Image (cartoon, rainbow, N blue to C red):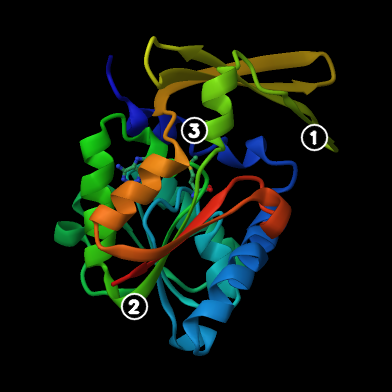
Amino acid sequence: MRNNVSDFYNNLASEYKSIFKDWDYSVKWQADCIDNIIMPQIYTQRNHTEILDCSCGIGTQAIGLALLGYKVHASDLSIKEIERAKLEAARLGAELSFSTADFRTLNKQIEGTFHVVISFDNSLTHLLKPEELQVTFNNINEKLVDNGLFVASIRDYDKFLEERPKILPPYVHDDQEGRRIVVQVWDWNDDDIYKVNQYITKQADQECSTICNSTFYRAITREEISEKLSTAGFYNIHWMMPEETGFYQPIVTARKL
Ligand SMILES: C[S@@+](CC[C@H](N)C(=O)[O-])C[C@H]1O[C@@H](n2cnc3c(N)ncnc32)[C@H](O)[C@@H]1O
């Protein structure tokens, strides 16, 4: 099994926004959600708070947080996504810095320390080996100032591991350019790893086309994540469910000792 994460996101970079009904709106909305979690926990102003988004993709969270006034550095494994994130930041008038980096080796690739490190929208579960997740949490811990805050969102795998769904409800977005249908089909292995086949269909007038890409995820329980965060030297590990935050995935916060 080849773990082709970088290829998957390099191929998806130019289409990533089409997954969303309105990506610009999501940038603002997600930043507000994250700001509501961070602000009560940092005891200082946004423009004095340095954030590292270590799996920024095309900037869905990083750009919105920069627009709110945080000092943001955004990194990702995918070169094409970083290129796209730079374009989107310029278009939206956000000032932040970018680099490519693997979150398993942040200590070698990213200079300095941050008050907050974030990793949103299920990025960490691309790591298929438990030991890689531990190495990543160790790296994130190293990139935080003392008492710094880590915030991440992960799919609700406690639920999905029971159900092992084959398909998730599709998204259907209609706008002036036509219709977009985004579907994920999940092929489960015998263990907790599954292959995601993502289909993005675009229809305008009588023209219809589909692109398909696939990659692998490991369904990681909240208990495993909490244990590994604790081993990496985090305390106050706290999970918030969507009913509490309004966000579409469970969110974990943890403090560096
Ligand atoms: C579902 S996307 C989320 C991106 C962004 N946070 C968002 O919400 O738009 C997952 C991201 O994790 C990144 N990623 C996966 N493995 C990584 C690694 N080892 N190091 C850094 N980034 C990684 C991918 O390149 C991708 O951009």
Structural crowding at the residue carrying mark 2, measured as other residues with C-alpha within 10 Å and reported as few (<14), some (14–19) or many (≥20)? some
Whether residue 136 is visible, yes or no, is: yes
The mark that comes first in sequence, 3 or 2, is: 3
User: Residue 10 is drawn in which quadrant?
Assistant: top left
Measure the C-alpha gap from mark 3 to mark 2: 36 Å
Q: Which residue is mark 2?
A: 147
Residue 231: give x, y in percent of width and height.
24, 54
Foreground residue, 95 or 45?
45
Q: Amino acid at mark 3?
A: Leu
Which element type, helix, strand or loop, lies under badge 1? loop
Structural crowding at the residue carrying mark 3, measured as other residues with C-alpha within 10 Å and reported as few (<14), some (14–19) or many (≥20)? many
For image coordinates 72% across by 52% down, the residue present is 243
The mark that comes first in sequence, 1 or 2, is: 2
Question: Can you say whether 158 is above or below 98 in the image?
Answer: above
Question: Can you say whether 133 is above or below 159 in the image?
Answer: below
For image coordinates 57% across by 78% down, the residue present is 39
Foreground residue, 122 or 57?
122
Which element type, helix, strand or loop, lies under badge 2? strand
Measure the C-alpha gap from mark 1 to mark 2: 47 Å
Q: Amino acid at mark 1?
A: Glu
Q: Which residue is mark 1?
A: 177
Q: Which residue is mark 3?
A: 12
Any atom of ligand 1 within 8 Å of the CB at mark 3?
no
Ligand 1's quadrant = top left
